Image (cartoon, coloured by chain):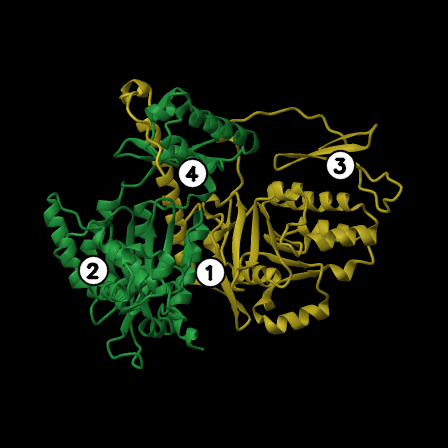
Chain colours: A green, B yellow
Amino acid sequence: MISQEQFDKAKADSSGKDPLIKKVKLSDIKIDDNSLKTGNILIGDSKIPVSNKFFNRLGQVVNLQTSLLNRMDKNADHSVQTKLLQAVKSYSETRDGDKEFLLIGDGTAREVTNIVKADKYHRLSNETLFDTAGLILNEVPDMHVESIDNSGGGVSINLIHGSQVGFDKIGKDEVFRFGVSLVNSATNSRVDDFFLRLSCANGAVARNLNTAFEFGQGQDAFRKLLESMTGWSKAGFVPRTFETRLEGAIRTKASYGELERVMNSVIGQIHDEDVNVESHYIRAAQQQFFPEFDITSKRIFKNGHNPQFLTDAQKKFIKTDSSVWDLVNELTWIGSHATTFNFQAPKKFKVEGGNLFAKSWDLEHASLAAI
Amino acid sequence: MTTSTETGVSYGLFNGVVKKLKDGTEPNSLVPVQPVTPTEMVAEVIEIGNMEFPPFTAWRSGDLIDQLFSDHTADGGIYSGTANIVIGESGVGKSTVTLDILAKIKRVQPEAKILYISSEMTRNDLYFYYQKTPIIANVPTLLVMDYVMGRFDKILEDTINGDYDVILIDSHQDIIVKLADILGWKSTRAMTWLTNLIIEAADKKGKTIFAIQHMTKGGQYVGSTYLKHATTSMMEIKFDDAGRRYVEFSKNRRGGSLIGKRLYYSLVEGEVRWDATSWRQETQVAELAEQERDKRSELESKFTDLFMSVGRPAEVEEPDTDAEPTVNQ
């Protein structure tokens, strides 16, 4: 649990670290023949540095295929790329001249990184996100701050309800506390589901399990959140489908593809300046967290296939000894506890664990093949 | 007010809105409006600080609703000299809420002279209504239906201009319909006449007027733009998505900071009970929304300062143009 002091400190640390924004119309943005080369756009008389992804984002908002832009980029067809972007942008100005867009700037990197339709940008400032959490803590009885994640960009404030919910028929360890996670992403603020498995203090964040709440604009957004909170708190924040999902996750075997994706996600966050040390860490993480991957790989070899040449579609059909629930627990444990591996953004594992729990599983209906 | 005797058109200035009025010479006008004697008018320009203002009274019901009426003092209250339109869909409780307010003003400030002008409900209707909401027992009431066989416009005019402080008209639209159907007035003239009567009574005689107005089924206001612009406030009574009832102001010249704030209520034992918890939350929600608006402005200013300040182009270091361009997925 997070104390008031820790909460205040996290708030102070995050405040002011918000993307800078500017409302513009497409016609305000000028791209000259050197813009792509030099990484600049013109707004009025100001030459504004932009990130290397900016022109792709601009292409997207004017409905230009980014794959085409990328292909031109790859083939060094920059003048064509520039002309195409200019032409499609000019066409959009005639069609969407009145639409407003937001340029999103990174104050630290001192460059504009993104452009979005103004009415689609629903991100609260970090300070307001913390104050919204404070409002919920005051208004919803027995609500606590379980953790605050701010690694890897964005901020997530995980709030949890005091009541414990056990699912004895599934297992005596399956006792949970439920709540919500207030999330600030790049362009929006939303509320995800949060649940904590008490036996190992694993926290998981999942989207669209129960809450599916995205902030809109103005007063109504906060009002609707409070109304929803009141509704969710009556059920102790337990998603209606949770028990069924839990039963299914315990019963369903993870596919080789699912196991591989989860493992790659974890080892992908292991880095060290010394390549040998890094590979040592990776092997250690594979053995500690995902021993079933090696076992299944050997089984695949034994059956005359090379796992390296299997397609993703083929990997979906191969059963492992891990259940989906094992993988969820592995991810959420890594996301919730300090390890020797010094992961760059461990909170990502809470989200990945939660999302794996909430999604459809490859072998969910495998038993039907026996009919 | 001036009248051109040649054209039979008069002009009135009501709360800053100039309104053109025809006299009652049209063939279908059964009861003509009395022409106003033309008077010589001389423009008088006065500094606001040197103007004479009447004493203003804030009428209070002793309930939370007072805080939604005005923001000039912590206690709020509905000010004298105001014309307030009350709108809401059928069945939401327009009459119930406003009658409750009237009854409670009388209870808190017994010196207040309150009046309910009922155009829609008959005496019999009122009996059953009173059985359900006994709090309205002390509300002096004028039943328009008792006068529809005669010049009830005169009765209305005399009563509204009479010795009352807080008057509830229920409803504006129904009186217009009666003026048109019974006295044969054109609807637009009836609307302007009644609106002017309300505005004059509020502005010149210092009365507090609540006028109930209807809404379409789609939730749209049905009154005229003139009425909407000339009145002090527009109080809306609505259902939210969960079917709970609330009051909010979409316009309020005595409480601009209160616009859009919701005050929920329910009916308990024949009285309106305002929801203190949701009001507290509403205040916090409004503060958060305001904070977020300020933050957005701050982030926009920072953007301008960082990227668009004068001399910025010179500060930007030009990357090596020979280097590979970078457009990535």
Quadrant for residue A167, please give it: bottom left
Outermost bottom residue: A169
A353 or A154: nearer the viewer? A353
Residue A67 badge? 4
Q: Which residue is mark 1?
A: B63
Secondary element type, mark 4: helix
Residue that mark 2 sits on: A334
Give, as a three-letter code, the residue at label 4: Ser
Q: Where is residue B63 shown, x and y percent of the image?
A: 46, 60
| Residue type at tag 1 | Asp
Look at the picture and state if A87 lies above or below B247.
Answer: above
Give the Cα separation between the discs numbered 3 and 2.
Answer: 79 Å
Could you say which is closer to the camera, residue B74 or residue B95?
B95
Residue B261 position in % (x across, y down): 47, 52
Work out whether disc 3 and disc 2 sit on a shared chain.
no
For residue A206, the mark is: none
Mark closer to the chain start, 4 or 2: 4
